Image: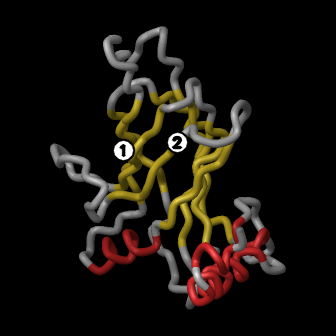
Amino acid sequence: MTASRSLGAAPAALLMFFLLPACGPGSAERMSPEPSSNVEELAHQNLDMTLDQERTTVEVQVPRALPEAAGKKLGLYLEGVEFGRPGVYFEVYADLPAGAEPKPEGTHYLGTLSSFGPKGGETTAGFDVTRLVRELEAQGHWNGKLSLTFVRRGLLPPPGQPKLEAGSKKVPPVRVKRMKIVRE
């Protein structure tokens, strides 16, 4: 059965309209996490941290003065990420106030760090922090530091089996080696 028979001609054409730009020339370059000549590294920091608790917070240094660059975004990249077990994921928050409940719909939520995808080796995860940094600057709270909080989620056992606890030898930890801030 063809797409036009199952979806109708108009929906099939609409589907192709949205899919073609993603498959066109240069799309792989736009989606690649590899740095290009248009990327300016603003800061980097060795973290060498282990995420083996329900909640882990680390402070990272960012240049205090971030001159505006029209059309450019600020990206925070976690590099050398090693996952110990599939199914583990972390909600990542920046400058989450002390005692605040982490909520993905909140303004401090950056995204998810997850092990879903290729297995083995190291990976890189990137987050857009442009809006957050600009909001902190506008409020007069930007001090060149970001407090990153990782909240572990997942690890739900099959029915009838106990939940694996943080720090358990049965739950291999997640490691993050480096962080960098770039303008892209």
- The percent coordinates of residue 21 (x first, y second) are 71, 82
Q: Residue furthest right?
A: 25
Count of marks placed on residues: 2
Q: Are dots 1 and 2 in contact, CB under 8 Å?
A: no
Quarter residue 176 falls in? top right
Residue bearing mark 1: 149
- Residue type at numbered disc 2: Ser
Q: CA distance from mark 1 to mark 2?
A: 14 Å
Q: Nearer the viewer, residue 11 or 93?
A: 11
Residue depicted at x 35% and y 57%: 109
Q: Secondary structure at mark 2?
A: strand
For the residue carrying disc 2, how many other residues have a C-alpha within 10 Å: few (<14), some (14-19), or many (20+)?
Answer: some
Residue depicted at x 57% and y 84%: 11
- Using residue 118 as the reference point, say whether residue 159 is left or right of it: left
- The percent coordinates of residue 171 (x first, y second) are 48, 17
Colour treatment of the image = secondary structure
Residue bearing mark 2: 114
Task: Tell which circle, 1 or 2, labels the residue nearer the N-terminal end.
Answer: 2
Q: Nearer the viewer, residue 53 or 120?
A: 120
Quarter residue 81 falls in? top right
For the residue carrying disc 1, how many other residues have a C-alpha within 10 Å: few (<14), some (14-19), or many (20+)?
Answer: many
Residue depicted at x 68% and y 82%: 16
